[in-house]
Amino acid sequence: METPLTNNISPGKEPADLRQYENAGGYAAVRKALRLAPAEVMAIVEESNLRGRGGAGFPTAKKWSFVPMGDDAPRPKYLICNADEMEPGTFKDRLLLEGDPHQLIEGMIISAYTVQADVAYIFLRWAYKLAAERLESALAEAYRQGYLGKNILGSEYSLELHLHVSAGRYICGEETALLNALEGKRANPRAKPPYPQVSGLWGKPTVVNSVETLCNVPHIVNRGAAWFKNLSRSADGGTKLYGVSGRVKKPGLWELPMGTPIREILEEHAGGMQGGYRFRGLLPGGASTNFVVADQLDVAMDFDSMQVAGSRLGTGAMIILDDKTCPVGMLLNLEHFFAQESCGWCTPCWSGLSWIEQILQGLEEGSGQSSDLERLQSHARLLGPGHTFCALAPGAAEPLQSGLKHFGDDFHRHIREKRCPWR
Amino acid sequence: MLSKQEKQQIEAKVHHYPNKRALSLEALKIVQEHRGWVTDEGIADVAEALQLRPAELEGVATFYNMIFRKPVGKHVILLCDSVSCWIMGYERLREHLTTRLGVGLGETSVDQQFTLLPNVCLGACDHAPVMMIDNAHYQDLDAGKIDEILAMYR
Ligand SMILES: NC(=O)C1=CN([C@@H]2O[C@H](COP(=O)(O)OP(=O)(O)OC[C@H]3O[C@@H](n4cnc5c(N)ncnc54)[C@H](O)[C@@H]3O)[C@@H](O)[C@H]2O)C=CC1
Ligand SMILES: Cc1cc2nc3c(=O)[nH]c(=O)nc-3n(C[C@H](O)[C@H](O)[C@H](O)COP(=O)(O)O)c2cc1C
Ligand code: SF4
Ligand code: FES
């Protein structure tokens, strides 16, 4: 089984420096890409069927294709790496950032070349201190070696790449909020359309891609679209970083073929449940995905299969709910997170989420009533797609509405017994 | 007034952005690094340097949770309160830390050594529960481990 994204990574060890990275075949893809026309690189990525690993699964080449090209295109154009990773339960980009910074830089150079971006930023979350340090030193090496800056490797193409360290808040990861944060403003999202590819950073064409997406690009360019598709067990190409946290024997992170079934990840890789704990459900792709329960564990973890199963692949970071943990308490924790992190722009989001938090608090403490469940349902509907500026609110609705569905009995027990049965 | 060092550090980033407003957060972080937190004077100093209105910069500063507009202790403890850590025992650790330090969440110990803040997922969920002190992650925490770690900072 090939694991291109994590080949150079040994957790706990220093990442490859430039020399070591080159010796392992690094930066060959940049050389190759620069010999091709941007449209040719685009064609390879399109053929590979790479879909965005930031959670929504939007086809990467398609996203790039919206960027205005040619001499009349507005300038400068920008490429941004979204390294704001703050989705609860998600810890995959951190491994790539700390473990192989040159891989990301190489992916960014090729992606920027493909859309002919002039300037690129890595938008990094504040808490990833070690990643910041390692990226800074890798960037300095890449500049020294002529992979960045004016006339890269003697070509016509030039690119400036800067590290921007953010100052907190989950909403900064939403791509248009990120643009405002990078411009030095409050990070409220912008209305889409226009999409950033047309009008983004300082109103200029901008592509925002996540860390994991960009890290795939050098391998696709090196090895080709057919190879990439073959890595996968499903229609979406490539491998995927899958994470598991909660009461399993071996919580962790693995690079596996895209489309690996949930059960295989849980049992073979995460070692199954810890002794004394039984499985009740899981959030498959971070906090903002619908719960998956025991009879759905044979579903393949890829974008389409998860959608068909009524949830989403999201970030591929599974959070396990066990039988010794209260589902109502878990939902309270999740909705508290969303309420706190709402940027305050849209009413259904800021107001709705604080109501939801209060109602869940009441239920958890034993003062809830049956009518609370209907109130929660209707709030969840109001948070759904189309009522708000950004996807934070629909994301908050997912665990809530699926939690009400799957753990209804537990809610009723809280109401009946006027207390949390787990406390 | 910005100190010479603060000014130099801000200047070093100027070429990253096409205008000064984009330096807002970077400049606030630099001032915070030197002064511990961002005072009203800090806001005024940065606003002047970046040619922004202080009220405007204040609006930006208060949006971001890692810009401290109140004094903090010598060390800032960020305790992850997101879902994986909650499942793995966040509440017990919070009790332990608040008793050990004699403070609630959002407070600073009397000896000014520690400020305890809850924080969203710190990106180490497979090693929950997790906290950060200043720039370092600490994971797979339990009460005993927390005591050992605190001792290193005293
Ligand atoms: N990695 C993390 O830490 C987090 C990830 N997420 C994920 O974020 C996702 C939601 O992200 P959004 O950006 O709101 O999703 P979205 O579906 O609006 O957009 C996804 C990407 O495709 C592009 N796109 C979509 N439709 C387009 C169109 N018609 N024309 C041109 N470009 C288009 C967007 O510009 C964006 O880059 C969720 O699936 C969630 O799982 C959410 C929170 C944190
Ligand atoms: C509230 C919110 C937070 C987000 N946070 C992140 C994030 O931390 N990292 C990320 O890559 N995408 C995040 N996204 C998704 C981005 O908006 C965007 O879709 C993504 O960066 C595109 O990258 P991709 O095409 O590589 O998937 C977030 C979306 C929302 C609604
Ligand atoms: S949905 Fe929530 S987070 Fe998104 S823009 Fe509206 S208020 Fe802000
Ligand atoms: S939930 Fe605590 S580190 Fe992710």
Image (tube, coloured by chain):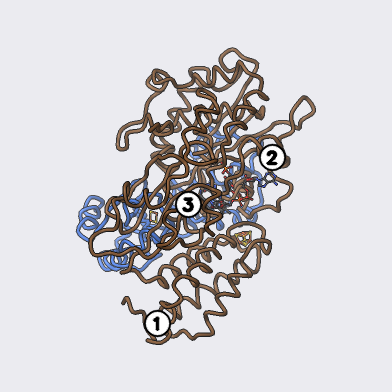
In the displayed structure image, the side of residue A283 where residue A63 appears, left or right = right
Residue A109: image quadrant is top right
Amino acid carrying label 3: it is Met
* Same-chain status of marks 1 and 3: yes
Amino acid carrying label 2: it is Gln
Q: Give the number of the disc on residue A197.
A: 2
Q: Judging from the image, what is the letter of the chain drawn in brown?
A: A
Instruction: Please name the residue that numbered disc 3 is placed on.
Output: A86
Q: What element carries label 2?
A: loop
> Mark 2 and mark 1: span between their CA atoms?
50 Å
Ligand 2 under 8 Å from disc 3 Cβ: yes
Instruction: State whether residue A256 appears in this view.
Output: yes
Q: Residues within 10 Å of mark 1 (few under 14, many from 20)?
A: some
Instruction: State whether residue B1 appears in this view.
Output: no
Q: Which label's residue is closer to the chain start, 1 or 3?
A: 3
Vertical order, A344 against A164 (above or below): below
Instruction: Please name the residue that numbered disc 1 is placed on.
Output: A413
The x and y percentages for residue A56 are 58, 49
Q: Is mark 3 on a helix, strand or loop?
A: loop
Q: Judging from the image, what is the letter of the chain drawn in blue?
A: B
Ligand 1 under 8 Å from disc 2 Cβ: yes
> Mark 2 and mark 3: span between their CA atoms?
23 Å
